[in-house]
Amino acid sequence: MREGKIGVAILGLGTVGTGVAEILSQNRALIFRRSGMDLELKRVLVKDPSKKRDIELQQEIYANEYRTILEDPQIQIVVELMGDLHPAKEYIIEALKAKKAVVTANKAVLANFGSELLEVARQNSVPLYYEASVAGGIPLIAPLTESLVGNNISSVMGIINGTTNYILTKMSKEGKAFNDVLQEAQALGYAEADPSADVDGLDAAHKLAILVALAFDDHIDLKDIYCEGIRSIDTMDIRFARDFGYTIKLLAIGKKTNAGIEARVHPTLIPVNHPLASVNDVFNAVFVKSQEVGELMFYGRGAGRYPTASAVIGDIVAVAKIMAGTGKALPRKFGSAKTLPITESSGSFYIRLMVEDRPGVLGDVAAILGRNGVSVASVIQEGRAQDQVPLVFVTHEVKQGALASSLKTISQLTCVHEIANVIRVEKGD
């Protein structure tokens, strides 16, 4: 066996953990030939070592006590793939304090405790890498921390949840209702039995918190990210969006402004000719805009066993080089920043009202909007001689707070049955 082996332990043998263990075991020689790093899988932490799994490992590799990994001097890298907040956070801290490098794909832990974990890593002079925590197999964290280190980044915007993108793609292409497509996604394994984290936008918010820190050098609290999911999207909205020249995607958006950082996750109308409009199914894509290089787009599969495992392996190799003394990188130090309240955020909006089918309704609504400084860019009014019909319009740019005041007054009109939907518009300027 070659000299200079670097011992690796994996915490958790779920979908991604199995992929990482498989690549480390089967591609060990390939990784060594390309990187010069001889990575040896020493231990895998599991609850039940006797359980039948998708991968066959030697029985002595399995461990059901974390202390076994912490006390093994031959293990230099701990790969946390357990998910959830606890005990993942505590295990990461213990590994860092034991002078073991850590690689994780745990976006929830990083979004909630990233500042604390990175500080522990700095104090102990060991690396903490997390490329797989955002956008799966797409190389994104490394470019933000290395290739673009000299750039003044002004915004990040993208599709970073494959489940919601799959659902919206199917709704758009096949005209199916949200609940029907969600059931299909669950049957295919694209959505969890409890899909709340995905369809309500929380998964994307976790990832956005990480992207904002890397792009703008400041941590923001997860609670300060405006978060809205896709449950309210109707096929009627998709049809009207298309009539206006847009498609609907769940976007995560971070922008640096003089008044603070904008951080928001919500369904968004984007022009059909925008590159993100053609990102479909479970694929992810992120736009990074900087003063120096303009716009860059990172695209690929955002989830799955092998795409995510690929990003984890890349981190393991990078960390191994540091531990072997051929590289040196301490975790970045981040500040804290004020976030811009969503009511102060400006933009254009798509609004669908369900109203009485009679003359004068549009005039009543437009008058209220005008009094609040909201101007209409485009409008569609459908009359079907039914009890209620859709009145749909897209506004010019307005503060969200001013629009909310307008809609509160509009909702009190007797001719308005319902404010059916309000969706942000990104024009791709």
Image (spheres, grey):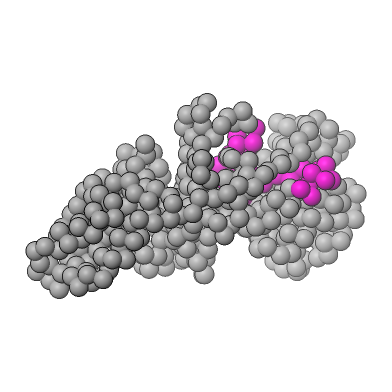
Segment colored magenta = 119-147
Magenta span includes 141: yes
Instruction: Name which quarter of the figure residue 332 lies in.
Output: top right
Q: Nearer the viewer, residue 133 or 407?
A: 407
Residue at 60%, 36% in the rendered image = 144
- Relative to 358, does residue 103 appear above or below in the rendering? above
Give the percent coordinates (x, y) of residue 153. 54, 35
Asked if residue 183 lies left or right of residue 44, the reply is: left
Magenta span includes 190: no
Q: Is residue 160 visible?
A: no
Residue at 66%, 60% in the rendered image = 83
Q: Nearer the viewer, residue 370 or 282?
A: 370
Q: Residue furthest front?
A: 371
Give the percent coordinates (x, y) of residue 269. 34, 49
Quarter of the image with the N terminus in it: top right
Asked if residue 325 lies left or right of residue 151, the reply is: right
